[in-house]
Image (cartoon, coloured by chain):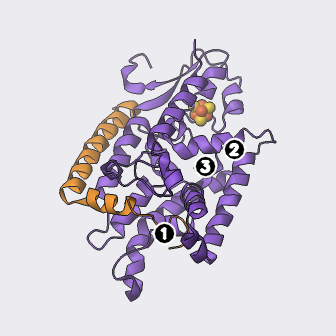
Amino acid sequence: MDKDKKKIITAYGLLLISLFCMLYGIVRGEPDTVLRKAIHICLECIGIG
Amino acid sequence: MIGKGIKRKLIQLASFGFCNSHINGFAEGKIYDGKLKTLCCPGMNCYSCPAATLSCPVGAMQAVAGSRKFNFSFYVVGILLAFGVMFGRAICGYICPFGLIQELFAKIPLRKFHLPKWLTYLKYVLLAVFVVLLPVVMPLFSSASGGVGDPAFCKYICPVGTLEGSIPLMSSHEELRSVAGSLFILKASILVITIIACIFIHRFFCKALCPLGAIYGLLNKISFLRLKIDTKKCTSCGTCSHVCPMDVNPLKYPDSAECIRCGRCVDKCPEKAIHIGIKHTDRSS
Ligand code: SF4
């Protein structure tokens, strides 16, 4: 198999994994944790936390 | 016809505008608290910026990993992996709001320097230690943390948060100014160094410090969007590597982890031998 084909297969494989990761993260409620952090001023980000 | 450079600038401006459309946050001194912030911007844009409408993926990754419930963010890693596999570091070149800010600093007409190659590896260390490791490991050593890990990159390093979050919020909040101490001095110093470096070194932050650049750089090698060199047309004149703002030699390393797919080499190549595109659709290459 040539190098380019390997890269394409790896890319499609990783894309599939990325979708599973996103779905798994959503199912276990990670977006709520992201939102909770993002809607309050992040004291660490602004250098006083 | 509009050149690649102008098209790229327009995309950068549109992305900057979309990620920072909560403009009245500056006047109110408040950050946006809508549901849109569940989503991550694919580039660096602090979620404590009053104008930010999306979350910063680096901050979000650390927040989830450092939380009591989780120690790894499948959600954010999935988002970054998807963007990286599709576009690689073109995200840095076209979408990242802080990338645009750095390019504006580079417009200051002073002599530009190359960054020593070894410094480009620093971003991988920062990603591994400050973004992935410390938020999870720190609570194990400190009972005072209550099991919650600090977002170490945001806390000790990120100049994006200092520029986009601290400055506007501190200017409108006396109570925040009054508690700023040594940590703020550290972060402000990193910001000043970053800005000065960005004036003299094109995209210093992207090259040396950005954890997102590290992730997308690793994926540049396999991303769908790639540089294509037509070796039949190329005369090896060296113009491409001479004009590259990221110090890449596209002829030798078209999949370099540093290439942000800005297209400058494409525009300047006298033989029109370089193209940016979806590699596998080009059966002839
Ligand atoms: S190699 Fe070409 S597309 Fe890549 S960063 Fe350099 S000039 Fe831009």
User: Which class describes the residues within 10 Å of circle 1: few (<14), some (14-19), or many (20+)?
Assistant: some
Q: Which chain carries label 3?
A: B
Kind of residue at disc 1: Leu
Q: Quadrant of ligand 1?
A: top right
Q: Position of residue A5 (x, y in %)?
A: 35, 31
Residue A14 visible in the snapshot: yes
Q: Position of residue B155 (x, y in %)?
A: 52, 69
Q: Where is residue A1 in the image (x, y as percent from the top left)?
A: 33, 32
Residue under pointer 1:
A43
Q: Where is residue A24 in the image (x, y as percent from the top left)?
A: 21, 54
Residue under pointer 3:
B207
Q: Distance between the residues labelled 3 and 2?
A: 15 Å
Tell whether B211 sits left or right of B250.
left
Kind of residue at disc 2: Phe
Q: The orange chain is which one?
A: A
Q: Quadrant of the C terminus of chain B?
A: top left
Q: Which chain carries label 2?
A: B
Q: How far apart are marks 1 and 3 (CA)?
A: 26 Å
Q: Earlier in the sequence, mark 3 or mark 2?
A: 2
Question: Which element type, helix, strand or loop, lies under badge 2?
Answer: helix
Marks 1 and 3 close (CB-CB < 8 Å): no
Q: Distance between the residues labelled 1 and 2?
A: 26 Å
Question: Which element type, helix, strand or loop, lies under badge 3?
Answer: helix
Query: Of tags 1 and 3, which is closer to the observer?
Result: 1
Q: Residue at x 66, y 28 (%)?
A: B240
Tell whether B203 sits left or right of A16.
right
> Tag on residue B105?
2
Q: Residue at x 58, y 69 (%)?
A: B174
**Total numbered circles:** 3
